[in-house]
Image: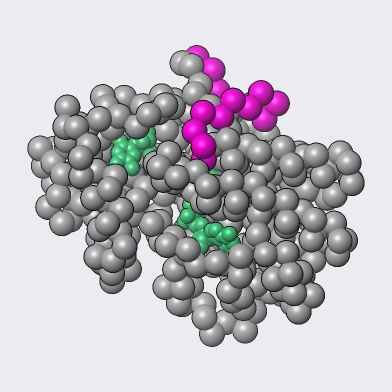
Amino acid sequence: MKNLLITGGAGFIGSNYVHHVLEAHPDYRAVVYDKLTYAGNLNNLADVSDHPAYRFVHGDITDRAGVERAIQEHDIDTIVNFAAETHVDRSILNPDAFIQTDVYGTYVLLEAARKFGLERYHQISTDEVYGHIPAGHSSLETDPVAPRSPYAASKTSGDLMVLAYRVTYNLPVTITRGSNNIGPYQYPEKVVPLFVTNALEGKRLPVYGDGRQMRDYQWVGDHCEAIDIVLHAGELGEIYNIGTGQEMENLRMVEILLDELGASRDLIQHVEDRPGHDRRYSLKIDKVRGLGWQPRHDPEAAIRKTVRWYVANEWWWQPIKSGEFREYYERMYGSRKVL
Ligand code: NAD
Ligand code: TYD
């Protein structure tokens, strides 16, 4: 394993993973293959753009010829697939791109991995495939999938295709299912960067419904380390959950965030809930711990560190929030009922 095709590497987690690979494996090459949708951003990779082991290819994972060309030109032996449409709220407005990229795109990559006999295909997946998890239970990798949003259903379909390629073609695959990531370079449609930047702009923080939904907020760097460990030490055909193993209510996340900013809790505004909102995600992470990994940050430390990054890096998020984002925000929140 030496020449990685990191699909979706210009997005949030993918770009953090590229940084990790270039540091942890000086003898590897990191080739990013990315469509640069609204969520892809070359500013995320600006500090490695001259790195001799880094290359960027502008391409779509649903384009079979483009994927095959990139594999051949860069002598790729491993695909790590981060490329996806990723926002639940957008999937509710328009699921089409989710089916195209998260389902069909995964199939195109699997076919290419098979055709060129790659050493490994690794799929980045999510805890959302397990659906809403009632109190008292935490998801095991062997639990049945029960996705409830178009985003979660498209990611689940991708996972099932990956597992089918293992069984049918003996493709060397692995899957990781991460909980909510936070940290540098996350597009500010996701809750933590949205709320930090809104607060910095003096805007209200739109908390969906009662705000008592629970998520496991993990530091993106921890997630990237775990992905890399699974890539090197994980068993073929296996799934590994990755998170802190500790979930908290959104309202608690918001309080920590506002406290770290020194901002008033009056900024909280409860608004109409997301349709089909999963109340709770919770992961058991013993299996990935068994590979020698453990999270370096608990959710509170991850939230505080994330807040500080956005405070220090206005250059990164200001241009995003003044662009296409404004239209999106108006569409998503403009006519939302205030509770
Ligand atoms: P992101 O939206 O920040 O980035 C997605 C990247 O994929 C962007 O660079 C985009 O340009 C690229 N992309 C989209 N469609 C493409 C296509 N057709 N061809 C090539 N590139 C394309 O997403 P993220 O938050 O970094 O998530 C990365 C992966 O991790 C996704 O598969 C997501 O499902 C998974 N995941 C995310 C989280 C989270 O909390 N963000 C948690 C668990 C799993
Ligand atoms: P999000 O970052 O969209 O991730 P996901 O839905 O994939 O877990 O949302 C995280 C949580 O925050 C989720 O419970 C929904 C909630 N949320 C809000 O309360 N307000 C918002 O404006 C957003 C975007 C999310």
Let me know if residue 295 appears in the view: no
Q: The C terminus is located in which quarter?
A: top left
Q: Quadrant of ligand 2?
A: top left
Which stretch is magenta? Answer: 136-151
Let me know if residue 128 appears in the view: yes
In the image, residue 147 lies in the stretch drawn in magenta: yes
Q: Residue at x 29, y 45 (%)?
A: 332
Place of residue 18 in the rendered image (x, y in percent of width and height, measured from the top left): 57, 66
Q: Main secondary structure of the magenta part?
A: loop
66 shown above or below 224 = below
Q: Residue at x 28, y 66 (%)?
A: 323
Place of residue 278 in the rendered image (x, y in percent of width and height, measured from the top left): 44, 27
Looking at the picture, tell me which residue is in the foreground, 303 or 204. 204
Looking at the picture, tell me which residue is in the foreground, 279 or 334. 334
179 shown above or below 308 = above
Looking at the picture, tell me which residue is in the foreground, 172 or 245. 172
In the image, residue 12 lies in the stretch drawn in magenta: no
Answer with left or right where residue 328 lies relative to residue 88: left
The colour scheme applied to this rendered structure is one colour
Place of residue 145 in the rendered image (x, y in percent of width and height, measured from the top left): 63, 27
Which image quadrant is residue 139 in?
Answer: top right
331 shown above or below 137 = below
115 shown above or below 152 = below
Q: The N terminus is located in which quarter?
A: bottom right
Which image quadrant is residue 164 in?
Answer: top right
Place of residue 195 in the rendered image (x, y in percent of width and height, measured from the top left): 26, 47
Number of residue marks: 0
Q: Residue at x 31, y 62 (%)?
A: 324
Q: Residue at x 45, y 45 (%)?
A: 94
Looking at the picture, tell me which residue is in the foreground, 246 or 154. 154
